[in-house]
Amino acid sequence: MGIPARQTMKVGWYLFRNRVAKRQRFALVVELEPLFACNLACPGCGKIQYPTKILRQRVSVEQAVGAIAAMVDELVARKRFVYLCTNAVLLRRKLDMFTPSPYFAFTVHIDGLRERHDDAVDRPGVFEEAVAAIREAKARGFRVTTNSTFFTNDSPETVRSVLDFLNDDLEVDSMMISPAYAYEKAPDQEHFLGVEQTRRLFRATFGDGRRGRWRLNHSPLFLDFLEGKVDYQCTAWGIPSYSVFGWQRPCYLMADGYTSTYRELVEETDWDRYGRGKDPRCANCMAHCGYEPTAVVATMSSLRESIRALRVSA
Ligand code: SF4
Ligand code: SF4
C-alpha cells in the first residue's frame, strides 16, 4: 500500500532485466547529495562534520535549493522516481519551486512526535514546522513520504505513536523507518541501537499486527529483518551515494574514499571486506540503505515472497 503500483512495476521490470543479464551488482536507488551543509545539527547525524571549505561547496542555500529544483525537474522528465529528502525547515517557503508528479515525492525527516523530534534535531519548533509543511505540500497535491530514524531512547510506544500520527493524522503517502547507523563522527555516541536492541524494538512495535496497517515504504522481508525473523548481509552497492566528492565507497554510511564512476565503484571495491562480522564499523548496522536492497532481491528470487510483496502493496 505504501509503494505506488507504477513504481513497483517499474522496479520489478528493472530487477528482472538485471537477472536475465546475470548482473551481480547493480543499483536500486541512487542517493544524490548536492551539498553537505545543513540548517540543523542533529546530535545523531554523521553527515555534516566536514571542514568549512567542504561545507561551502555550493554557493548559497538559495542557489543550492534552486539547483536541486532544476535537478528534480530533469530527473522527473526522464521518468525517474525522485524522493527529495528534507528536514522541511524551508519547505513551505520553497514549495512554489516544485511541481506535483507521480514520479516525485518529498521525504520529510520526522523522528518522533513534538518533544522527541525536536530533541533529535536539537531545535525547538522544527516538528511543528515540518508538520505544517507536510500538510501544505499534501494540500497542494504533492506526494509526501517520511523517513524516521530510531535510537535507544525510543520504545515500541514512541515508534507506534509517530507512525500512527503520520499514517492516520497526516495521511502521508508512505513511511520509511530505520535504526540509526552509528556514525563515528556523530556528536551523540550514546544512543545508537545494537542488533539485538533493534530486533527487540521492532518485534515489540509490530507485535500487535499493526505493521500491516501502516503504509510502510518497505518490502515485507526488510520488516521481517528488522524483527529478527530473517537475517541478511547488506547489499552495500544497492543504494550508492554520489556527492561533491564522487561515488562514496562502500556505501552511504561509511566513507572509505570515492570513485569518479559507478562502474569503478562496483568493479574496484573489495566488497568482501564490508558487512556485519567483517568490518567493526558495520557491527550494528541494520539501516534500510544497506539491507532493503538485499530484501528486495530476496523477494524477487522467490515466487512466494513476490506474491506476498504484491499483496502488501495492493
Ligand atoms: S540528520 Fe539533521 S543535521 Fe543531518 S542532514 Fe539531516 S537534518 Fe541535517
Ligand atoms: S553493513 Fe553494509 S550498509 Fe551497513 S555500514 Fe557496513 S557496508 Fe554500509
Image (cartoon, rainbow, N blue to C red):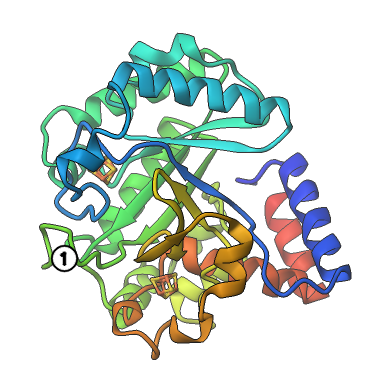
Q: Please give the name of the residue rendered at 56% of the width and 50% of the height, measured from the top-left corner.
A: 30
Q: Position of residue 86 (x, y in %)?
A: 37, 34
- Helix, strand or loop status at disc 1: loop
221 vs 95, left or right, is right
Q: Position of residue 166 (x, y in %)?
A: 41, 38
Q: Please give the name of the residue rendered at 48% of the width and 53% of the height, measured from the top-left corner.
A: 241
267 and 47: which is toward the camera:
267
Q: Is residue 288 visible?
A: no
Q: Residues within 10 Å of mark 1 (few under 14, many from 20)?
A: some
For residue 71, above or below residue 309: above
99 and 66: which is toward the camera:
66
From this viewpoint, which residue is outermost toward the top? 96
119 vs 72, left or right, is left
For residue 102, above or below residue 21: above
Q: Position of residue 265 (x, y in %)?
A: 55, 65
Q: Is residue 258 visible?
A: yes
198 and 91: which is toward the camera:
91
Residue receiving disc 1 = 191
Please name the amino acid that badge 1 sits on.
Answer: His
From this viewpoint, which residue is outermost toward the bottom? 277
Q: Position of residue 60 (x, y in %)?
A: 28, 21
Q: Please give the name of the residue rendered at 59% of the width and 58% of the height, measured from the top-left corner.
A: 262
Tell me the quarter of the picture where residue 219 sits: bottom right
44 and 62: which is toward the camera:
62
For residue 283, above or below residue 113: below
